[in-house]
Image: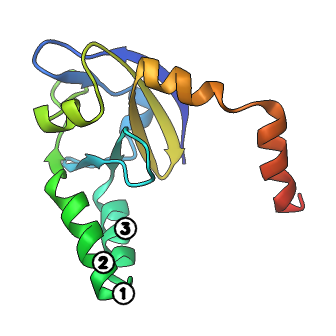
Amino acid sequence: MLYGGYDHTIDKKGRIAIPAKLRDAFGDTFMIAKGIFGKNCLCVYSNEQWDKLVEKIGNLPSAKSSVVKRYLYEGAFEVEFDSQGRILIPAALREFASLETEAHIIGVDTNLEIWNKELWQKENSDYTPESIAAIVNELDF
């Protein structure tokens, strides 16, 4: 399970270090893509999680599946860690997520999200203990 939030910088070449405790969930190569949940962040998936996502998308009705595939696959790239635990974020994805110098990395169970730090702070400010409690109450926990 991936969890935690980490602030990191993006260097001039577009590289970002992934925290060591999060790296173990990924193999030699893995996928980075545009977020698909209505947010301008990037998602990082192990190949296993990527394959599960692709399979689920394939189960959608054909017309919907085609739309999602075009959107997702056009902005998906295979990446790998360098010797310092960094990944190179392709320029198209940096532009999509407004990533320039400051980023926030979040472990979200099975994948990572990489956010522009300011956009994350704005997004996160919408969450309050009350709004989270209202959602959690649905769990009947």
Q: Say what amino acid the circle numbered 1 marks.
A: Pro
Q: Say what amino acid the circle numbered 3 marks.
A: Leu
Which residue lies under the disc numbered 3? 53
**Total residue callouts:** 3
Q: In which image quadrant can residue 63 be found?
A: bottom left
Q: Is residue 59 above or below residue 70?
A: below
Question: Residue 28, position in %: x, y?
Answer: 20, 47
**Quick one: 50 or 35, which is closer to the camera?**
35
Chain-order first, disc 1 or disc 3 = 3
| Mark 1 residue element | loop
Q: State yes or no: discs 1 and 3 in contact (Cβ < 8 Å).
A: no
Q: In which image quadrant can residue 92 be found?
A: top left
Question: Residue 34, position in %: x, y?
Answer: 29, 47
Rounded to the nearest angstrom, the CA distance separating label 3 from label 2 is 12 Å
Q: State yes or no: discs 2 and 1 in contact (Cβ < 8 Å).
A: yes
Q: Which mark identifies residue 85?
A: none
Q: Say what amino acid the circle numbered 2 marks.
A: Ser
Which residue lies under the disc numbered 2? 65
Sort mark 1 into few (<14), some (14-19) or many (20+) by Cα contacts within 10 Å: few
Q: Which mark identifies residue 61?
A: 1
| Mark 2 residue element | helix
Rounded to the nearest angstrom, the CA distance separating label 2 from label 1 is 6 Å
Mark 1 or mark 3: which is in front? Answer: 1
